[in-house]
C-alpha cells in the first residue's frame, strides 16, 4: 500500500493498518450498526430465518423445514450460517443477518483490494521508470473511495442488512473476479494453482448457496478460466 495519502507521508505501521481500519469502519457503520433493531422484512426473510431456527431446534442440518414442512427452495448454505449464528449469539435478528453483513464487508474488502492492485501497484513487467512509478503513487485514495462507493451502494446496503442469500452469492462471485484479476495482473505461474482453487471453491459454494442462481458463478468461472488461459497463451507466444 502506498505510504502517501493526500500528499502526506505516513508511518509504515499506519500504512499497514489503515486499509483494514477503513474496511472495518465502513462495515460497522453501513452494515452492522443497529443491524437487529428492525423486525424481519416481508415474507422472504422470515422463510430463511425460520428454516435456520428449526435446524437448531431439531438438530437436522441436512433437510430445511418451515413450520414442519420441508423447504427445498434454496440450498442449505445460508441456513447453516444463520444456524451457526443462532447457536453462537442467540436467536435474534442480529444473528440472522450476520452472514449477510459479513459478506457485504468482505465484498467491500475485495473491492478495495482490486482497486489497490490496479491503481497503486505497477505490473511486474510494466515500466518501472521514476515517472511511471510516480503516476501510480498519485492514486492512493482511489481504493478508499471505491470501497466507500461499494459499501454505500443502495443494493449493497439493502441486501447487506437482510437475512437473504443474495449478498453471500455476490461475495462468491466477487471472489472469482478477484482471483482472475489478480492472476492477470501479477502473471505469476506459482500462484496459478491457488487462484484456480479459489475459483473452483467459489463455484461450489455458490451452488450450495443459491442453487440455480449459483450457475452465474459457474458462468463467471468459465469466463475466468478462458481469460487466464488466453493470457497464459499470450505469455507463451511472447516467450
Image (cartoon, helix red, strand yellow):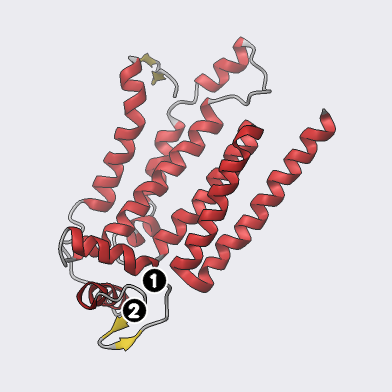
Q: Secondary structure at mark 2?
A: loop
Name the one closer to the observer, 70 or 187: 70
Picture coordinates of residue 124 (x, y %)?
64, 23
Image vertical order of residue 108 relative to residue 74, above or below: above
In-image side of 143 versus 36 (left or right): right
Hey, which residue is sitting farthest bottom in the picture?
69
Picture coordinates of residue 197 (x, y %)?
56, 48
User: Residue beneath label 2, please?
Assistant: 64
In-image side of 115 versus 131 (left or right): left
Image vertical order of residue 100 relative to residue 21, above or below: below
In-image side of 88 versus 125 (left or right): left
Picture coordinates of residue 101 (x, y %)?
30, 55
Quarter of image, res 219: bottom right
Q: CA distance from mark 2 to mark 1?
A: 7 Å
Q: Quadrant of the N terminus?
A: top left
Q: Earlier in the sequence, mark 2 or mark 1?
A: 2
- Residues packed near mark 2 inside 10 Å, few (<14), some (14 to 19) or many (20 plus): many
Identify the residue at image location x=66%, y=34%. Answer: 189
User: Residue beneath label 1, please?
Assistant: 76
Picture coordinates of residue 154 (x, y %)?
37, 57
- Residues packed near mark 1 inside 10 Å, few (<14), some (14 to 19) or many (20 plus): many
Q: Quadrant of the C terminus?
A: top right
Identify the residue at image location x=43%, y=73%. Answer: 75
Identify the residue at image location x=79%, y=37%. Answer: 234
Image vertical order of residue 130 relative to residue 24, above or below: above
Q: Secondary structure at mark 1?
A: loop
Q: Are marks 2 and 1 in contact (CB under 8 Å)?
A: yes
Amino acid at each position: 500500500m502506498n505510504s502517501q495519502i493526500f500528499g502526506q507521508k505516513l508511518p509504515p505501521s499506519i500504512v499497514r493498518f489503515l486499509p483494514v481500519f477503513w474496511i472495518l469502519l465502513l462495515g460497522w457503520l453501513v452494515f452492522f450498526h443497529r443491524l437487529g433493531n428492525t423486525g424481519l422484512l416481508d415474507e422472504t426473510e422470515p422463510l430463511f430465518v425460520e428454516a435456520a431456527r428449526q435446524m437448531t431446534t431439531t438438530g437436522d442440518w441436512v433437510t430445511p423445514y418451515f413450520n414442519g414442512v420441508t423447504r427445498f427452495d434454496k440450498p442449505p448454505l445460508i441456513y447453516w450460517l444463520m444456524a451457526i449464528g443462532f447457536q453462537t449469539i442467540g436467536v435474534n435478528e442480529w444473528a440472522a443477518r450476520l452472514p449477510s453483513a459479513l459478506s457485504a464487508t468482505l465484498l467491500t474488502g475485495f473491492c478495495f483490494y482490486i482497486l489497490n492492485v490496479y491503481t497503486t501497484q505497477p505490473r511486474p513487467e510494466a515500466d518501472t521508470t521514476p515517472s511511471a512509478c510516480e503516476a501510480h503513487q498519485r492514486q492512493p485514495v482511489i481504493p478508499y473511495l471505491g470501497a466507500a462507493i461499494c459499501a454505500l451502494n443502495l443494493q449493497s446496503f439493502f441486501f447487506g442488512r437482510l437475512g437473504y442469500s443474495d449478498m453471500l452469492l455476490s461475495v462468491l462471485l466477487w471472489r472469482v473476479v478477484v482471483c482472475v484479476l489478480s492472476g492477470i495482473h501479477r502473471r505469476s505461474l506459482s500462484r496459478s494453482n491457488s487462484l484456480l482453487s479459489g475459483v473452483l471453491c467459489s463455484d461450489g459454494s455458490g451452488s450450495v448457496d443459491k442453487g440455480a442462481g449459483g450457475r452465474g458463478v459457474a458462468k463467471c468461472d468459465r469466463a475466468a478460466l478462458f481469460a487466464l488461459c488466453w493470457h497464459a497463451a499470450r505469455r507463451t507466444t511472447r516467450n
